[in-house]
Amino acid sequence: MKLLAIIGSQRIEGNSYLLAEEVLKSIGEVDYEIIQLAEKKIGFCNFCGKCEFGECVLEDDLNSIVEKMTVADGIIFSFPKYFTVPSKLLCFLERLDMVQHCKKYRGFKKTGVEPDPDFTPPFKGKPLCLFVVSATGRAEEPLRLVAYQLAGMEMRLIMHDSWPFLGVPVKGEGRGEVLADQKGMEDCVRLIRRLVDSINR
């Protein structure tokens, strides 16, 4: 089994990375890879529409990340609360959604177009889970925003068993503080195990 963690923080090896790494290390039966968007070049979508016919034509790291997402058995998004969601993560999600939309509706400039019946979303049914780091330990709005974006791509969100259900908020501000939130860490491990169990089923 191969899991892919995508770190949405704009800080390299910050709390969102440390959280994902620690939790993934605790799950001994899986291979995993961690991608930090802070280390990647992710440009802004310019609405050229050319992705209707293939990969995104922008020369950055999006297509290589999409390839890794496609082959992964499950995906973890770990990100901090920056009022809502870090702008680079929002940009990444917009790019993912735009590529899928242009293929599904054969471009974006036409109105009233029915979806292409032969199009299968590349991540349809792909299981994922969400971790979010905040200074207060509360982060319902960022979880809702990211969950909504990914649901639009027909990915399968593995829910947590307690509030706020869409994912696990973990408390941390200074680098490394997230590892001291014992309950948050335990909740993340439990959610990852749910993710793994859903894949095994």
Image (tube, rainbow, N blue to C red):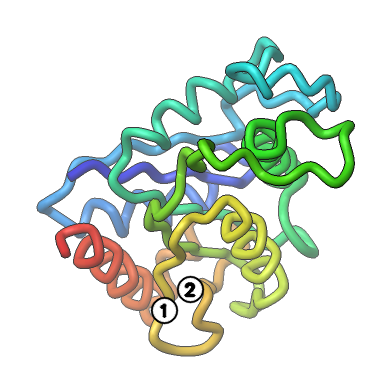
Q: Dividing the picture into quarters, in which one does residue 102 lie?
A: top right
Q: Would residue 60 be found to the left or right of residue 196 on screen?
A: right
Which residue position is annotated with label 1?
160
> 72 or 34: which is nearer to us?
72
How far across and how far down the image is residue 33, in percent? 33, 36
Instruction: Determine the residue positioned at 56% across, 67% down.
Output: 172
In percent of width and height, residue 31 lies at 19, 41
Q: What is the three-letter code of the residue carrying label 1?
A: His
Mark 2: amino acid: Val
Dot 1 surroundings within 10 Å: few (below 14), some, or many (20 or more)? many
The answer to the question of whether label 1 and label 2 lie on touching residues, with beta carbons closer than 8 A, is yes
**Which residue matches tag 2?**
168
Residue 52 x, y percent position in the rendering: 68, 23
Residue 18 % position (x, y): 43, 51
Q: Is residue 151 visible?
A: yes
Residue lying at 49% horizontally and 28% vertically, measured from the top left:
65
Q: In this view, does 2 lie to the left or right of 104?
A: left
Mark 2, Cα crowd under 10 Å, few <14 / some 14-19 / many 20+, is many
Q: In this view, does 178 lie above or below 152?
A: below
Who's the residue at 62% across and 46% down the image?
9
Which residue is located at x 41 percent, y 45 percent? 5
Tell me the mark number nearer the camera, choosing from 1 and 2.
Answer: 1
Disc 2, SS: strand
